[in-house]
Image (cartoon, rainbow, N blue to C red):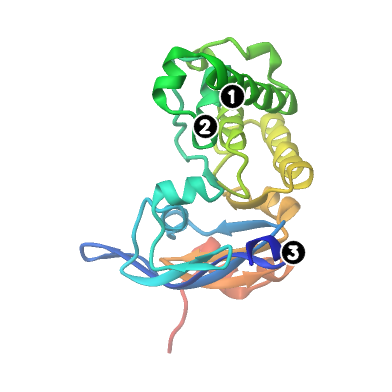
């Protein structure tokens, strides 16, 4: 039962996932799980299939083979609206914000799946719809305080520096109150100080919100510091899975990252 899930139980399992585009194989026979309450890193060289894996999990891509079990329910494939309504939120490798809208309004869009009143009520902004929006706005203000972005709450995000836009995108995902948060390179392009801030927020989201996190990240120092477990992909296949220490010592991982040519003779 969904309500009986405990810390450390699987919240999500992907089993034997195959994904191809025409003649190009993106994922081949990939299986792993994500445990409730953990920070789970997905790493690998460029082109390893990491973003494709997140796209399978939240329903943007539909695998030709395999299945996904999320909170005890098994599906051949996830649909984006099912993912969002059942507690999966996502940030993207390339920032996907409404650049002309303020920080506050961008984060408010993350509450869409929580809104119960129909469009007519919302348009009239009367009675229950007004109360509902005020409740959502209170939660968004809590997210803004948590991410320490009060000073930019009314600033159009297109005018913000890159690192701050990344923080706003995280805020929009948090506004959906996800149980599973998928972060696609949340620290890409950041300077050292911005990375340190983002690491702190990721850990705080996991600790204070109780959110399970699946993280794609190229900075191995970050991965080793904040992850509970790591799964490694290379050319669409899983080559390692374990604790950061186990993965760092795995010869296949060393070869994949260093580009060492294997001697198959």
Report the side of 36 relative to 180 (left or right). Answer: right
In the shown orientation, is residue 10 left or right of residue 59?
right
Task: Point out residue 108 in the picture as x, y percentages from the top left corner.
Answer: 55, 24
Q: In the image, which disc is placed on residue 115?
A: 2
192 w.r.t. 102: above or below: below
Q: Are marks 2 and 1 in contact (CB under 8 Å)?
A: yes
**What residue is at 74 percent from the left and 23 percent from the top?**
145
The residue beneath circle 1 is 132
Find disc 3 in the rendering and name its residue.
6
Of residues 69 and 119, the one drawn nearer to the viewer in this rendering: 119
Q: Residue furthest front?
A: 127
Q: Secondary structure at mark 3?
A: loop
Q: What distance separates the C-alpha of mark 1 from that of mark 3? A: 31 Å
Viewer-side residue, 118 vs 163: 118
Task: Give neighbour class at mark 2: few <14, some 14-19, many 20+ (Cα, 10 Å).
Answer: few
Where residue 157 appears, x then y in whole percent? 52, 17
Is residue 45 found left or right of 39 in the rendered image? left
- Between the residue at mark 2 and the residue at mark 1, the CA separation in whole angstroms equals 7 Å
**Image quarter in which the N terminus is found:** bottom right
Disc 2 and disc 3: Cα gap in Å?
Answer: 28 Å
- Residue 84's place in the image compared with 194, above or below, is below
Residue positioned 38% across, 63% down in the render: 77
Most extreme residue toward the bottom is 265
Dot 2 or dot 1, earlier in sequence:
2
Q: Position of residue 214 (x, y in %)?
A: 60, 53
Q: Residues within 10 Å of mark 3 (few under 14, many from 20)?
A: few
């Amino acid at each position: 039962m969904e309500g009986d899930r405990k810390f450390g139980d699987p919240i999500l399992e992907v089993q034997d996932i195959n994904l191809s585009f025409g003649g190009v194989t993106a994922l081949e026979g990939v299986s792993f799980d994500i445990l409730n309450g953990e920070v789970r890193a997905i790493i690998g060289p460029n082109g390893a299939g990491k973003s494709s894996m997140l796209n399978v999990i939240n329903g943007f891509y539909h695998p030709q083979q395999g299945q996904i079990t999320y909170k005890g329910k098994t599906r051949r494939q996830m649909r984006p609206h099912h993912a969002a309504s059942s507690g999966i939120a996502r940030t993207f490798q390339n920032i996907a914000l409404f650049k002309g809208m303020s920080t506050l309004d961008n984060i408010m869009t993350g509450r869409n799946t929580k809104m119960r009143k129909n469009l007519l009520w919302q348009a009239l902004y009367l009675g229950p719809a007004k109360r509902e929006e005020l409740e959502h706005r209170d939660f968004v203000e809590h997210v803004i305080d948590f991410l320490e972005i009060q000073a930019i709450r009314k600033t159009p995000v297109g005018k913000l520096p890159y690192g701050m836009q990344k923080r706003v995108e995280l805020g929009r995902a948090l506004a959906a109150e996800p149980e599973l948060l998928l972060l696609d390179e949340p620290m890409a392009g950041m300077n050292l100080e911005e990375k340190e801030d983002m690491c702190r927020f990721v850990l705080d989201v996991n600790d204070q919100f109780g959110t399970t996190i699946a993280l794609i990240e190229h900075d191995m120092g970050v991965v080793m510091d904040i992850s509970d477990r790591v799964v490694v992909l290379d050319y669409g296949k899983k080559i390692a899975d374990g604790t950061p220490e186990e993965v760092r010592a795995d010869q296949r991982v060393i070869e994949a990252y260093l580009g060492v040519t294997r001697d198959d003779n």
